Image: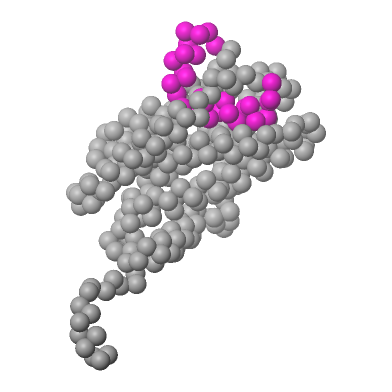
């Protein structure tokens, strides 16, 4: 009877690796392995290794903050220019770093994309998660150090901080995913993009308040989603700051559209582009 039942059971059996749960855990393992590969390859020529990846941007932020604080001792908000500058620069660096790393994720993981277990999304998620973690730690250390050193009476709104970090991260992921396709498709576009990004810090409100500008100028700057990210972060540390212009939905809409376009483009054209 058992033999007859076995013969009648001709339905195809799904291998364990194809089950939804197996695919989910496989993705987690692959992303974790890619993150470890990334941490091992970064700054491998220095004696500090991966630690230098966190020290370098922190040192650059401290240097830039010191320079701007000498140039302007009276910040537009509060009494401490270092805190004012960091609340803008941290959000800006979160976006630019995530965007840059995600945009180059396909090239970085190109040798591994030939393996069936490694997908384009795995390569993007690994770099995204690692860079969000690095810059979140960097921001927390720098801001805490400034508040402690200057004995500032600041009670930050942690919800607004997390919201600003989420906005910057999502925007970096979306734009970076789209650029990952466009960089592979056109090296000329990559060069043009690099040139256009140089004045981005100036027009994003890192060292000034968008509210203080004339309406004829500020209304155009509002189309820059990074302005909304920085505005949310500033509101987290300065409750009296008027951040009514901040549109969380606008930032996530731009992030969602660019991320979707990037995934579609990568799914269709990435291997053709890499084979050129």
Picture coordinates of residue 150, whole percent (x, y): 78, 32
Q: Is residue 207 above or below residue 31?
A: above
Side of 260 relative to 86 (left or right): left
Q: Residue at x 20, y 52 (%)?
A: 275
At a point 68% along the width and 25% down the height, the residue shown is: 238
User: Residue 64 placed where, x, y %?
Assistant: 60, 31
| Nearer the observer, 258 or 66 | 258
Question: Foreground residue, 261 or 269?
Answer: 261
The N terminus lies in quadrant: bottom left
Q: Is residue 173 magenta?
A: no
Tell me: 262 left or right of 9: right
The image quarter in which residue 67 lies: top right
When the figure is inspected, residue 273 is found, relative to residue 155, above or below; the finding is: below
Image point (28%, 43%), residue name: 264
As drawn, which residue projects farthest toward the front?
A: 1
- In this rendering, would 243 be left or right of 44? right
Q: Is residue 85 visible?
A: no
Describe residue 6's horizontal placement relative to residue 137 as left or right. Answer: left
Residue stretch in magenta: 213-240
Q: Position of residue 193 (x, y in %)?
A: 35, 31
Q: Position of residue 131 (x, y in %)?
A: 50, 47
Q: Nearer the viewer, residue 266 or 150?
A: 266
Residue lying at 28% horizontally and 71% vertically, measured from the top left: 14
Queried whether the magenta region covers residue 224, the answer comes back as yes
């Amino acid at each position: 009877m058992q033999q007859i039942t076995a013969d009648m059971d001709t339905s195809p059996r799904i291998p364990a690796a194809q089950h939804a749960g197996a695919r989910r855990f496989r993705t987690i393992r692959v992303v974790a392995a890619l993150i470890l590969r990334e941490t091992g390859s970064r700054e491998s020529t220095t004696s500090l290794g991966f630690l230098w990846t966190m020290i370098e941007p922190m040192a650059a932020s401290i240097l830039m903050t010191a320079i701007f604080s000498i140039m302007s001792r009276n910040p537009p908000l509060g009494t401490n220019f270092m805190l004012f500058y960091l609340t803008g620069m941290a959000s800006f660096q979160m976006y630019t770093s995530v965007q840059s790393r995600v945009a180059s994720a396909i090239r970085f993981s190109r040798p591994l994309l030939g393996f069936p277990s490694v997908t384009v999304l795995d390569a993007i998620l690994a770099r995204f998660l690692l860079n969000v973690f690095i810059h979140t730690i960097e921001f927390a250390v720098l801001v805490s150090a400034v508040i402690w050193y200057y004995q500032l009476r600041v009670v930050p709104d942690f919800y607004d901080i997390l919201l600003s970090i989420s906005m910057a991260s999502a925007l970096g992921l979306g734009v970076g995913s789209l650029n990952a396709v466009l960089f592979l498709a056109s090296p000329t576009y990559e060069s043009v993009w690099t040139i256009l990004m140089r004045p981005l810090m100036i027009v994003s409100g890192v060292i000034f308040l968008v509210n203080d500008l004339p309406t004829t100028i500020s209304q155009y700057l509002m189309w820059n989603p990074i302005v909304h990210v920085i505005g949310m972060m500033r509101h987290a540390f300065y409750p009296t700051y008027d951040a009514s212009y901040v549109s969380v939905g606008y930032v996530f809409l731009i992030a969602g559209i660019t991320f979707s376009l990037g995934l579609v483009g990568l799914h269709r054209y990435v291997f053709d582009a890499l084979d050129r």
